[in-house]
Image (cartoon, rainbow, N blue to C red):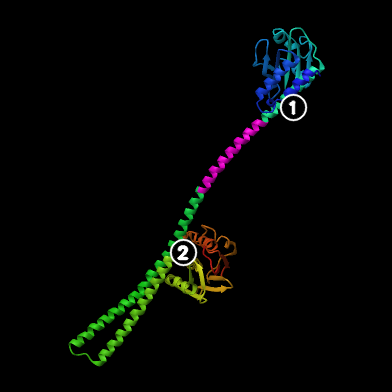
Amino acid sequence: MKEALELILLSVGQSPDIDNGELSVATELIINSVCKGLNITRAGIWLYDDTQSSIRCKLLIDKGNNLDDESLVLSRTDFPQYFAALDAERSIAAHDALTHPATIEFAEVYLSPLNISSMLDVPIRHRGKMIGIICCEHQGEGRTWHDDEIVFAATLADLYGRAVSAKERSDYEAQLVEANHTLEQKVLERTAELEATLKTLEGAQEKLVESEKMAALGNLVAGIAHEVNTPLGIALTSVSSCKEELQTIYQDFENEELSEDGFKEFNEVCTEGLNLAESNLLRAAKLVQDFKRTSADQTSLEIEEFVLDEYIHSVCNPLKPMLKKEQIALDIDVAPDITITACPGIVAQLLTNLISNAQRHAFSDTNNEVNKVSVKCVKQNDMIELNVTDNGKGIPDSLHKKVFEPFYTTARDKGGTGLGMNILYNLVTQKLNGTIDLASAPGEGTSVTITLPMVSGK
């Protein structure tokens, strides 16, 4: 190959315009290099359509007519011989384009009007597939295309294929950048949506916990109202009786009819009545005190150290009226002097939920002589086990996993929400760092064991 042609190929091959993705710039560089190297004034790049049924001019430079672009299309149906030659995917060197079998179809409509005497078409390949041609057109007297000129044009065609690859790569990179930007935006939007949803769920969870607290307190209030009325009524009756006795003894005193025996009888009756009133008022006061402590604790999450046996009794006492109404006996067995550092309100809620659950679910369709709920608390090494057991109808194995699921309940027709045991599970595992286990079988009752560390608040 002539040195001049080699220098042109070296210059084009090293040009950044080939690989920077700007295909139009690379196309113009290659066509101008073709014209310069082959000493012609007219050359163009033609590309197949998707079906290879036609070929369209991508860029045509005609230096003689000062043209740098023509929108020309050649179809297979109009020029079958030319397309048949292209199908061979080899260079077409038409030294005499007016008579060459591949180009003779252009003689009257294209070659003669433009004074084109010779044509050299070299295939452009991309990824191993022919996608078009570089068409070199010599105007004036005919010429013979030499081998080094054919190789020169074919090499420039290969460089065009490289420029097409660079364009694709640039487009892919731009698409990737856009996709990454879009993805980042979507991630930010989705993250914001998830954070908003999480806040909503946290708010809903707090409301559900409060709802369960209020439901538990509602059960306490119902039982306390009935139970407090009983000792207050007895105390009121006793005080009224003492008042009547006082009036009678005073009249006897005024009438000077008061005897020693009558005064002694008055003293005995009043002492008995006042003792009865006092014991019942103390009973009512104890119920109210326990209820105040329990209700206050259930609305507070402060951590403190407290003695479990005293606290469990104070929590369970207000529940006894509710159980008594349903003819359920409550048995409390708590080891003495067990101290725990935790949130007492959570412990109160656990006990209230478990005992209320047993009262609501355990004893329908049972034939026990005595329906009983037992509360037991013992210390095991550095852990505390709190157990609530009933002798009710029990729970089938298939439902054990569902017991702690939210919204699962068998008493929805009675107003059950299915949240009590789920909230209890979350309080034990998340707030008290403990574990909770369920043991139950049909006809054998249900036992729930909560295991807590000695210091379980956080």
Seen as rendered, the residue at the extreme bottom is 260
Q: What amino acid type is highlighted by mark number 1?
A: Lys
Q: Along the line of sight, which residue is nearer the eye, 122 or 449?
A: 122
Residue 189 in the image, given as x and y percentages of width and height: 53, 42
Where's the N terminus, which quadrant?
A: top right
Q: Locate residue 333 relative to residue 14 in the image: left or right.
A: left
Compared to residue 123, the image places residue 170 above or below, namely: below
Pinpoint residue 415: horizontal percent, then vertical percent: 45, 60
Name the image quarter holding residue 267: bottom left
Name which quarter of the figure residue 50 lies in: top right
Query: Which residue matches tag 1?
Result: 129
Residue 269 visible somewhere in the drawing: yes
Residue range highlighted in magenta:
169-195
Instruction: Let me know if residue 326 appears in the view.
Output: no
Label 1: state its secondary structure.
strand
Q: Which mark is residue 302?
A: 2
Main SS of the magenta segment?
Answer: helix
Whole-percent x, y for residue 276 in the image: 34, 81
**Of the image marks 2 and 1, the number of the one nearer the N terminus:** 1
Quarter assignment of residue 441 = bottom right
